[in-house]
Image: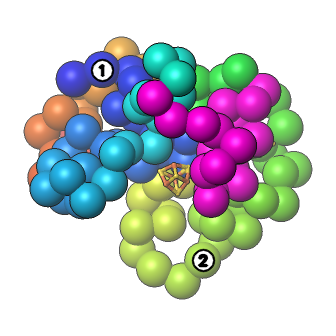
């Protein structure tokens, strides 16, 4: 488990099925090594977050007023609310506490104690 496996939006790649079956490279992995080019990334939240030098959007002081991430979190679908919850959890408790909980998940999101 590693902080690098946490997606910019709060999805947890390490326990995400597409990541584990090899159909997704993960949100943030490979950009620091030059293996992937952030300019080519489709997800604009990721482009913004990595471009600003944040680990995830949880580090961003503008998150409350960011239309991009708030529209994403407001989308129809259970997972979007769970990604918001992950980001809020990280903002309140930090990455280490998040990783302790997320390592037991079987999806890109999961339960909190
Ligand atoms: S939706 Fe975007 S920010 Fe979220 S995990 Fe996927 S690429 Fe990363
Ligand atoms: S401005 Fe929005 S998308 Fe960009 S880092 Fe902040 S919260 Fe994330």
Q: Is 61 placed above or below 2 here?
A: below
Magenta segment, which residues? Answer: 35-52
Residue at 34% over, 45% down? 25
Q: Position of residue 46 (x, y in %)?
A: 63, 45
Q: Nearer the viewer, mark 1 or mark 2?
A: 1
Q: CA distance from mark 1 to mark 2?
A: 28 Å
Residue at 60% over, 37% down? 37
Is 79 positioned to the left or the right of 109 in the image?
Answer: right
Residue where numbered disc 2 is placed: 75
Q: What is the number of the mark on residue 92?
A: none
Q: How many marks?
A: 2
Q: Is mark 2 within 8 Å of ligand 1?
A: no
Q: Position of residue 11 (x, y in %)?
A: 41, 49
Q: Residues within 10 Å of mark 2 (few under 14, many from 20)?
A: few
Ligand 2's quadrant is top right
Is 51 magenta? The answer is yes
Q: Earlier in the sequence, mark 1 or mark 2?
A: 1
Q: Position of residue 99 (x, y in %)?
A: 29, 26
Report the magenta stretch's main SS.
helix
Q: Secondary structure at mark 1?
A: loop
Q: Nearer the viewer, residue 33 or 92?
A: 33
Q: Nearer the viewer, residue 85 or 15?
A: 15
Q: Position of residue 113 (x, y in %)?
A: 23, 40
Q: Is 62 placed above or below 96 here?
A: below
**Could you tell me if residue 65 is visible in this image?**
yes
Image quarter in which the N terminus is found: top left
Residue where numbered disc 1 is placed: 2
């Amino acid at each position: 488990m590693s902080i690098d496996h946490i997606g910019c939006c709060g999805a947890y790649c390490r326990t995400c099925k597409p990541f584990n079956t090899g159909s997704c490279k993960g949100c943030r992995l490979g950009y620091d090594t030059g293996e992937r080019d952030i300019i080519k990334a489709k997800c604009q939240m990721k482009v913004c977050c990595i471009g600003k030098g944040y680990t995830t959007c949880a580090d961003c002081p503008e998150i409350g007023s960011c239309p991009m991430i708030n529209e994403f979190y407001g989308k129809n679908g259970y997972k979007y609310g769970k990604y918001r919850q992950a980001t809020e959890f990280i903002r309140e408790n930090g990455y280490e506490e998040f990783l302790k909980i997320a390592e037991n998940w079987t999806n890109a999101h999961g339960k909190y104690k």
